[in-house]
Image (cartoon, rainbow, N blue to C red):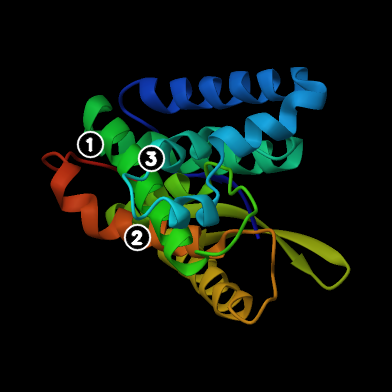
């Protein structure tokens, strides 16, 4: 399912959401300019669980737990993540305020990265992408706007249908899908996608929500 838009207009300008979009795009443009050196860059700033595990006797660097959420592995990876961020983050930022939302986003990204590390401690593949942090935004959105309508492109056999789905159902299905694939990945399937980062980020968004959300405003939808 591909979300096209929701039916809740933002009240204030989503300054942080737009800034995160721009930063992610600029970092990706820098990535593709590196050419031969891109691999070294990914290994330096991506999250490699095995490297963190080897440092546990010392003081492990927490840098990759944050820097990895601003890296992407390709155009499709970047566009998919930024599309979800654009649709769902503006309303969450409205309810939290700009600074609270930024801290919330970074904390969800950190928890998502840490979840991936715990589940895949021996992996030598760099984990990159904003999807863990964005999953936190999705978790918060589901709790804040469960009755919002999400206009969704849904494949139906050989056809595509556009239907409105309540946010709670759309995001609930998304989470169940991530969880099932995450469980499957424990057996060696689904390699290449950090499903447990998505799961950890989503749950972090739900449980951290009350720490960051401001007094409820009136929304009409």
Residue extending furthest toward the front: 57
Q: Could one spot residue 214 in this view of the protein?
A: yes
Q: Is residue 136 above or below residue 15?
A: below
Query: How far apart, in angstroms, are the residues tagged by discs 2 and 3?
Result: 38 Å
- Report which residue position mark 2 lands on: 146
Q: Quadrant of residue 184?
A: bottom right
Q: First in sequence: mark 1 or mark 2? A: 1
Q: Position of residue 119 (x, y in %)?
A: 47, 68
Please tell me which residue lies in front, 95 or 200.
200
Nearest to viewer (mark 3 / mark 1): 3
Query: Looking at this rendering, what residue extends furthest in the left direction?
Result: 215
Question: Is disc 2 surrounded by few (<14), some (14 to 19) or many (20+) residues within 10 Å?
Answer: some
The residue labelled by disc 3 is: 61
Q: Which secondary structure, mark 2?
A: loop
Q: Which residue is mark 1?
A: 96
Relative to 29, does residue 80 appear above or below in the rendering? below
How far across and down, in percent of the image, does residue 167 sit? 44, 59
Mark 3 neighbour class, 10 Å CA radius: few under 14, some 14 to 19, many 20 or more: few
Marks 1 and 2 sit apart, C-alpha to C-alpha, by: 17 Å
Secondary structure category for the residue under label 1: helix
> Left of 45 or right of it: where is 31?
right
**Quadrant of residue 98 in the image?**
top left
């Amino acid at each position: 399912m591909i979300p096209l838009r929701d039916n809740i207009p933002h009240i204030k300008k989503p300054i942080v959401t737009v800034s995160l979009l721009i930063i992610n795009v600029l970092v990706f443009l820098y990535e593709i300019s590196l050419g031969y050196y891109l691999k070294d860059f990914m290994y330096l700033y991506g999250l490699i669980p095995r490297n963190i595990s080897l440092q546990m006797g010392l003081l492990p660097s927490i840098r990759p737990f944050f820097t990895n959420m601003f890296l992407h592995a390709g155009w499709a990876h970047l566009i998919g993540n930024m599309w979800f961020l654009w649709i769902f983050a503006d309303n969450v930022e409205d309810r939290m305020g700009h600074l609270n939302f930024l801290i919330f986003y970074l904390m969800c990204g950190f928890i998502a990265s840490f979840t991936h590390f715990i589940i895949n401690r021996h992996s030598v593949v760099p984990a990159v992408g904003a999807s863990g942090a964005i999953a936190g935004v999705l978790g918060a959105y589901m709790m804040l706007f469960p009755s919002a309508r999400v206009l969704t492109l849904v494949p139906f056999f050989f056809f595509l249908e556009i239907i409105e789905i309540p946010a709670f159902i759309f995001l609930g299905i998304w989470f169940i899908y991530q969880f099932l694939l995450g469980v499957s990945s424990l057996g060696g399937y689904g390699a290449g996608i950090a499903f447990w980062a998505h799961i950890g980020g989503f749950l972090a968004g739900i449980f951290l929500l009350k720490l960051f959300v401001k007094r409820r405003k009136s929304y009409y939808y």
